[in-house]
Amino acid sequence: MSERLKVRLAYQRGFQIVEGSTILAAFENPVEAFKFVRDRGARAWLDWGRTVIASQTGQYDLPRVSCNPQSAAF
């Protein structure tokens, strides 16, 4: 498995986890999608137009982080 998995927003399908051209999983919400990536020890590669993190916009390659669904603000 790749060290980096792509998380993409699939119109009306939720969030997909992709490796190359293969869809590995799909989830209704981003928290579950990122938990899937984290549980595999991979890094998240965001694939949607605008990402805002700490009031800054841009494309980011995030390191593996702990995901707490209760504190996530999505």
Image (tube, grey):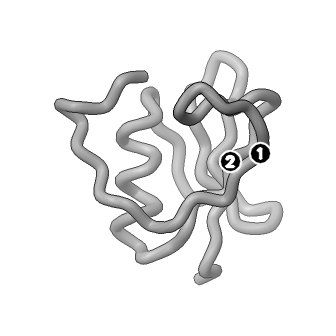
Q: Which residue is mark 1?
A: 59
Does residue 50 appear to the left or right of 6 in the view shown?
A: right
Residue in the foreground of this view, choosing between 25 and 38 = 38
Crowding at mark 2 (Cα within 10 Å: few <14, some 14-19, many 20+): some
Image coordinates of residue 14 in percent, x first then y, are 56, 27
Residue at the far top: name it: 12
Q: Secondary structure at mark 1?
A: loop
The residue type indicated by label 2 comes to Leu
Give me the residue at 73% from left, 62% from top: 22
As measured in the structure, the alpha-carbon distance from the residue carrying label 1 to the one carrying label 2 is: 7 Å
Q: Which mark is residue 46?
A: 2
Image coordinates of residue 39 in percent, x first then y, are 34, 67
Q: Is residue 31 above or below residue 3?
A: above
The residue type indicated by label 1 comes to Gln
Image coordinates of residue 43 in percent, x first then y, are 55, 68
Residue at the far front: name it: 55
Instruction: Determine contact: label 1, label 2, CB under 8 Å.
Output: yes
Give me the residue at 30% from left, 50% from top: 67
Mark closer to the observer (1, 2): 1
Q: Is residue 43 above or below residue 62?
A: below
Q: Determine which quarter of the picture holds residue 49.
A: top right
Q: Determine which quarter of the picture holds residue 73.
A: top left
Q: Quadrant of the N terminus?
A: bottom right
Q: Quadrant of the C terminus?
A: top left
Residue at the far left: name it: 70
